[in-house]
Amino acid sequence: MIKYLQTHPWKIIEEGFKRKHQRSSESIFSIGNGRFGQRANHEEKYSGSTLMGSYVAGVYYPDKTRVAWWKNGYPEYFAKVLNSTNWIGIRVFVDGEELDMGTVNITHFRRELDMKEGVLRRSFVAEMHASLIGNRDGGEAKQIKVEVERFCSMADDETAAIRYAVTPLNFTGTITFKAYLDGDVRNHDSNYEEKFWENVMEESSTGEGYVVTRTRKTELDVAVGMKLSARLNGKKFSPTFLSSSQHFYSENSFEKEVRQGETIGLEKFVSVVSSLNNKKDELLSVCKRATNRAFNLGMEKMLDAQKKKWEEIWNRADIVIEGDDQAQQGIRFAIFHLNQTYTGTDARLNIGPKGFTGEKYGGSTYWDTEAYCLPFYMGTKPQHIARQLLIYRYHHLEKAMENAQKLGFTGGAALYPMVTMNGEECHNEWEITFEEIHRNGAIAYAIFNYVNYTNDKKYLAEFGLDVLLGITRFWAQRVSWSDDKKMFVMLGVTGPNEYENNVNNNWYTSYIAQWCMKYCMEAMEWVRSNDPVAYQLKVKKYNFDEKQETERWKNIISHIYLGTKEDSNILIQQDGFFDKELLPASSLSDDERPINQHWSWDRILRSCFIKQADVLQGLYFFESDFSKEIIKENFDFYEPMTVHESSLSPCVHSILAALLGYEEKAYELYMSTARLDLDDYNHEAHEGLHITSMAGTWMSIVQGMGGMRCPTATLHDVPSPANPKGKGDDGLVFSPMLPKHWKSYSFKVLFREKIYYVQVNSGGVTIDIT
């Protein structure tokens, strides 16, 4: 755990410049608007360790796979989210000496991310090395005060703005600004140190400039523009801008003599647009219009629009915790980043594990979206936003079938990728790419979760059944018949616990495969009964032999092997698990944690230690299938062996702990997920934030502490043991607990066009429905 940030309910604050934590701060203080985002790099020169990062949604490069040896079926590339044109750059000179945050003496430093307004602010005092008052040996160093604020507009997602101000504190001198756009950038994670961009054009004119670049191979264009204005002591003036441009680069500069105590300011209005949403031959014109739109609106009106947009977001999504500012800061940090990462305006976009905060994991789509993020967007956004996340996978169905075909599956079987940008698998670690197939189940579960929550059953006839059919066909071919067990088995898989590879009969994988087949048949029956025309079209389109295929599915459902420890309710994580030496994670010394940074992979694989919820992931998804006694016995057995070294781990365990009444454990694990990046639990914040696990932070409160459940009804409202009436009460159910660390908490949840406002305090629970 690394704690250097201040606790505040609405802000992330860094007091004093921590150079050794600069890369982590660049991640934590990142900003975005769903279309593009920017790490919290300094505008001015910084010669220290940094990861410059400016990212544009949907723009990627298929970086050639690099592995020690090739295996048949490996993807030929790994899709990289691209570090794009640096639009924040502002070089600053004091009487000819450049301000370099990596070398000058910095005092009174404060960096602040205002989550309520979506604005990043920074201020500091710099003592220049070469510039001495009077230029005498031993003279006093010239001091400047710098104040900066910037934001990516949520109100106009093609624009951003920066206000940069310099005040000479103890001298009168010449301040020079050089504002620039630089498209000559490279990715830190490039496999072969190559650059991913080609130059298209650049131009500069008085007070403005533009750079257009194009990705190699994918040929996606990005245009970035800037337009500048200047202020002296808050009043606009017209400096003499000197403009220049060269390959990949556009710059405008001006200088002015500034008296001691006066403040010289530069306002930089920016646009970032891509050919993903515009025709290439019109891209520059679109960029210029957006840049002028921001410039003409001006900083104050842009800020007002930004504040109003964030006010709308917080009014629906905020969670208020009284009595525990660290818990409060953590949940708002999660809600903030989720909203600026994905807005749901484009079905081609998804939620990368690092969002706009770093390059690790390629910035592509993982099963995290379906398993963790979907509930957040269902509960805080209009219904079509969550629907977009499902449609994204429908659009990739053909690619999922191609992925399965490459691995030898036939007849329309679909294997969704572990990592993707366009539906094609681009992950190249064999134990993940070929074996972590439970991702297919998460995508099917998301369809169920969405339909059950929203009651949008029409989705099944439009898109959902197509996906379920492809996934179910995959499972039907992936199992094997065991003459020894006289059952169907699932061989050679990796479950959610990635500290176990190439195992047989992972309980979670087998259970979700069985469930997928059941749900597919249920969905099939609903579509056939309610939209027979759509059903027949799908039968024809996918060459579906209902009788033959469903008979096999039913046979697998009835005979799939699911291991249970003899004389107990323990669901066996996989074959051979009980051959291990079973030790609690508490037996590990602190200098061995996290074990993935200290142990060999061989040692990890032979140990009992669990990276994240595996069996317990299944009990979380399918809680209504199991008694509380079974859930308790398995939680008590598996959680103590879990090292929680996946960002996706604490939230599931926190929810189950709350269900079981383990208040302190639920709170402890909530804090682990809420402050994972803020306190850098796993020493990896410098690589980017864990955006998708932030949705788990939201779930830990709403589903965990708040005990929210959506009654599970079958598509045909048939009574079942978990649902004896055959359907829910058309409303949500809550069973809250109040951690002793909190005085109260409250949240809002959108459910079927109604807003549930839940308030919990020592006096009880209040639920208002509007």
Image (cartoon, helix red, strand yellow):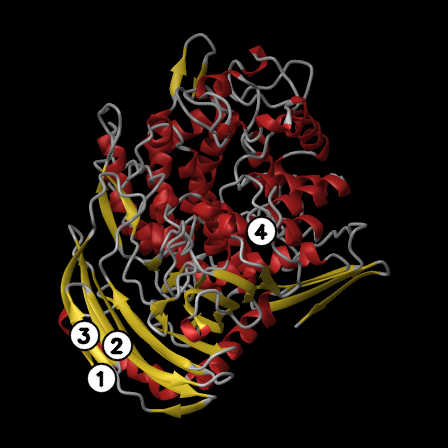
| Amino acid carrying mark 4 in the image | Leu
User: Does 416 sit left or right of 367 as displayed?
Assistant: left
Q: Is disc 4 placed on a helix, strand or loop?
A: loop
Q: Sequence-wise, which precedes: disc 3 or disc 2?
A: 3
Judging by the rendered image, the residue that carries numbered circle 4 is: 678
**What percent of the width, then of the height, locates residue 323?**
77, 59
| Amino acid carrying mark 1 in the image | Thr
Q: Is disc 3 placed on a helix, strand or loop?
A: strand
- Is mark 1 in CB contact (under 8 Å) with mark 2? yes
Q: Sequence-wise, which precedes: disc 1 or disc 4?
A: 1
| Amino acid carrying mark 3 in the image | Ser
**What percent of the width, then of the height, locates residue 357?**
42, 54
Judging by the rendered image, the residue that carries numbered circle 1 is: 206
Judging by the rendered image, the residue that carries numbered circle 2 is: 252
How far apart are labels 3 and 2 at the CA level? 6 Å
User: Does 370 sit left or right of 583 as displayed?
Assistant: left
- Is mark 3 in CB contact (under 8 Å) with mark 2? yes
How far apart are labels 1 and 4 at the CA level? 42 Å
At label 2, counting other C-alpha atoms closer than 10 Å, the crowd grade (few under 14, some 14-19, many 20 or more) is many
Judging by the rendered image, the residue that carries numbered circle 3 is: 244
- Is mark 1 in CB contact (under 8 Å) with mark 3? no
Give the mark toward the camera: 4 or 2: 2
Q: Sequence-wise, which precedes: disc 1 or disc 3?
A: 1
Q: Is disc 2 placed on a helix, strand or loop?
A: strand
Depth check: 571 or 66 in front? Answer: 66
